[in-house]
Image (cartoon, rainbow, N blue to C red):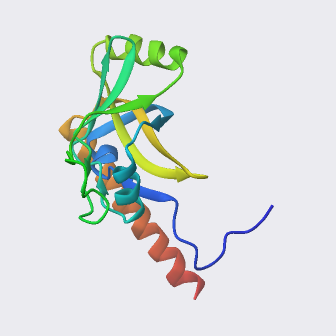
Amino acid sequence: MSKKKPGAPSATIALNKKAKHEYHIEERFEAGLALLGWEVKSIRAGKAQLTDAYVLLKDGEAWLLGSHIIPLSTASTHVIADPTRTRKLLLHAKEIAKIVGKVNQAGYTCIPLAMYWKKNKVKCEIALVKGKKLFDKRATEKERDWNRQKQRILRETNV
């Protein structure tokens, strides 16, 4: 296998950092995105955001709502660019059926976690999630702090 070059750019385009704090992630799916040309150019320039985005399931199809791709002034001169337009997620029918079945259960929702390059295609990682309660969020924060302290203690004793 070839190794990644040290100066090579990361494949990650955008992350939904709030997702891990706000939700328990149950199951992940990889979906393709149906994009326009100006959107791909903007994404290559790093002008994409996933904060407050969510997945809408309608008529056996999955749609990405609330994602924001800022249009480049040079790339979208002949088109009226809508930065928050609804984008179609490309999934297999079995995956959509599985997601719809879970979302119809109480407490489940579907959100995007990350947008990244896979070869020359833009992919979106979506997940089935359940909302965390306040005490869950506090427990997660406490555990993260303890792990950080543990690493610090181990480093100090090894030196």
Q: Quadrant of the N terminus?
A: bottom right
Q: Residue furthest bottom?
A: 159
Quarter placement of the C terminus: bottom right
Q: Nearer the viewer, residue 25 or 51?
A: 51
x and y percent of residue 139 in the render? 29, 46
Residue 6 in the image, given as x and y percentages of width and height: 62, 78
**Farthest right residue?**
1
How many numbered dots are placed on residues in this image?
Answer: 0
What residue appears at the point 34 percent right and 46 percent down from the top-left corner? 20
Please identify the residue farthest to the front as the structure is shown: 78
Q: Is residue 78 left or right of residue 150?
A: left
Q: Residue at x 66, y 75 (%)?
A: 5
| 26 vs 144: above or below | above
Residue found 34% across the figure and 59% down from its top: 42
User: Which residue is more in the foreground, 64 or 79?
Assistant: 79
Where does residue 19 sit, x and y in percent of width and height?
Answer: 31, 44
**Residue 113 horizontal/vertical position (percent):** 38, 43
Depth check: 102 or 42 in front?
42
Which residue is painted at 47% across and 15% down in the image? Answer: 98
137 left or right of 154 in image: left
